[in-house]
């Protein structure tokens, strides 16, 4: 975890200190179309080099829908026009690899704009069938959606 963004409220040290002791609430931005589901190729740890659902930490005092909008804009360059909570994800693989303990609330979103990635991903693609190199818990979560 690095702080490459001036609006992120925690330093890497604060993040590690806090989230090594308590669960981390995240939102997952699920974008689906006739082309499949949109995944990005992580260019940062954890799970660098794997396909995943864009998502991130919910900030203190931030509404969930605000977090979805912020993360979609930050990671994908899109404007969320609607969002709907569809499920949750737990991430035991993070715990087993001593990263943290995230719990993700997945939102299905509609959007406007063109996909433009930030530094956290090197590629974005639509998938009708899930790639082999995908975050393990997200693979299980996405199968029923395809």
Image (cartoon, rainbow, N blue to C red):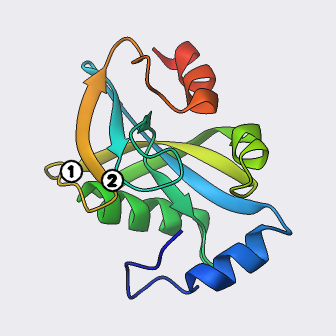
Location of the N terminus by quadrant is bottom right
Q: Is residue 78 above or below residue 92?
A: below
Measure the alpha-carbon separation of dots 1 and 2: 7 Å
Please give the label number shown on residue 18. none
Point 71% across, 54% down: residue: 102
Confirm whether residue 60 shows in the render.
Answer: no
Say left or right for 138 vs 74.
Answer: right
Say left or right for 85 vs 112.
Answer: right
Mark before the other along the chain sequence, 1 or 2: 2
Q: Closer to the camera, 66 or 101?
A: 101
Point 16% across, 53% down: residue: 113
Q: Is residue 137 above or below residue 65?
A: above
Q: Position of residue 95 (x, y in %)?
A: 77, 48
Q: Closer to the camera, 136 or 30?
A: 136
**Residue bearing the label numbered 1:** 112
Q: Position of residue 128 (x, y in %)?
A: 34, 13
The local secondary structure at tag 1 comes to strand
For disc 2, the neighbor class at 10 Å (few under 14, some 14 to 19, many from 20) is few
Do the residues bearing badges 1 and 2 touch, measured as CB atoms within 8 Å? Answer: yes
**Outermost residue toward the right?**
21
**Residue bearing the label numbered 2:** 81
Q: Closer to the camera, 7 or 46?
A: 46
The local secondary structure at tag 2 comes to strand
Say left or right for 52 vs 58.
Answer: left
Q: Position of residue 124 (x, y in %)?
A: 25, 39
**Outermost residue toward the front?**
97
Q: How many marks?
A: 2
Confirm whether residue 141 shows in the render.
Answer: yes
């Amino acid at each position: 975890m690095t702080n490459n963004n001036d609006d992120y409220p925690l330093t890497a040290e604060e993040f590690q200190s806090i989230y090594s002791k308590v669960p981390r609430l995240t939102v997952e931005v699920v974008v689906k179309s006739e082309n499949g589901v949109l995944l990005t190729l992580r260019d940062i740890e954890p799970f660098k080099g794997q396909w995943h659902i864009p998502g991130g930490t919910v900030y203190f005092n931030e509404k969930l829908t605000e977090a979805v909008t912020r993360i979609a804009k930050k990671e994908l360059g899109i404007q969320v026009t609607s969002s709907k909570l569809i499920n949750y994800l737990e991430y035991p693989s993070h715990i087993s690899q001593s990263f943290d303990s995230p719990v993700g609330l997945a939102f299905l979103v509609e959007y406007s704009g063109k996909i433009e990635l930030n530094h956290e991903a090197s590629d974005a693609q639509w998938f009708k069938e899930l790639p082999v190199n995908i975050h393990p818990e997200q693979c299980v979560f996405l199968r029923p959606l395809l």
